[in-house]
Image: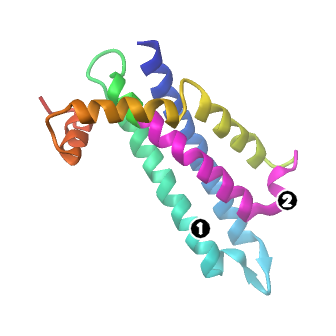
């Protein structure tokens, strides 16, 4: 299934780019000073960084799920879950990174703008979250499992 391949691979690309965006943002917040201290020491900035770190971790886990099929190619439902989750997180990660960087984030000399443009492009490639969420939802509703058990069954490669 070309759609599953594309979704799983773009989920992995988003996860990698999201990690790099987070690393750049964390470094910038630790280096940039305002009012005599690094902006990363301000509670409001720390909160945004912690939410961003959570989204990056979720992307990493989702990408692993998307590429964890037993055969030679990813299964459609785990790929749908992965692409849906990473696409949803991509916009928030990019927005937070640009909010914390300010104007430096859009300059040609700084890599953030390259990475966030790719996040937005990959978010739409092979279906955005708006395309994949109904696929996941329909499968969940058709399942005899409760939602948590459905997710466990889909994401656990040892499940029957």
Residue 28: % across, % down:
72, 64
Which of the pair 68/135 is nearer the observer? 135
Q: Residues within 10 Å of mark 1 (few under 14, many from 20)?
A: some
Disc 2 to disc 1, C-alpha distance: 18 Å
Residue 155: % across, % down:
27, 37
Which of the pair 7/143 is nearer the observer? 143
Which residue shows up at 28% across the image and 30% down it?
Answer: 139
Which residue shows up at 14% across the image and 35% down it?
Answer: 144
In the depicted structure, whether residue 49 falls above or below residue 64: below
Q: Is residue 45 left or right of residue 105?
A: left
| Identity of the residue furthest to the right in this view | 108
Q: Which residue is mark 2?
A: 103
Residue 136: % across, % down:
35, 33
Q: Which residues are magenta?
A: 82-108
Quadrant of residue 36 within the rendered picture: bottom right
Residue 135: % across, % down:
38, 29
Q: Is residue 16 left or right of residue 114?
A: left
Q: Earlier in the sequence, mark 2 or mark 1?
A: 1
User: What element does badge 1 sit on?
Assistant: helix
In the depicted structure, whether residue 62 falls above or below residue 102: above
User: What element does badge 2 sit on?
Assistant: helix
Q: Which residue is mark 1?
A: 48
In the depicted structure, whether residue 9 falls above or below residue 30: above
Which of the pair 8/80 is nearer the observer? 80
Quarter holding the N terminus is top left
Q: Is residue 67 visible?
A: no
């Amino acid at each position: 299934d070309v759609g599953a391949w594309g979704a799983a691979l773009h989920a992995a690309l988003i996860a990698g780019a999201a990690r790099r965006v987070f690393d750049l943002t964390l470094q910038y917040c630790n280096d940039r000073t305002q009012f005599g201290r690094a902006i990363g020491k301000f509670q409001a900035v720390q909160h945004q960084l912690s939410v961003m770190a959570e989204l990056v971790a979720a992307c990493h886990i989702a990408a692993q799920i998307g590429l964890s099929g037993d055969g030679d190619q990813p299964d459609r439902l785990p790929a749908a879950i992965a692409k849906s989750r990473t696409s949803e997180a991509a916009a928030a990660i990019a927005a937070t990174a640009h909010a914390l960087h300010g104007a430096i984030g859009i300059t040609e000399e700084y890599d953030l703008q390259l990475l966030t443009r790719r996040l937005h492009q990959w978010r739409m490639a092979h279906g955005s979250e708006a395309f994949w969420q109904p696929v996941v939802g329909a499968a969940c509703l058709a399942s005899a499992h409760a939602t948590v058990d459905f997710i466990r069954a889909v994401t656990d490669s040892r499940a029957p």
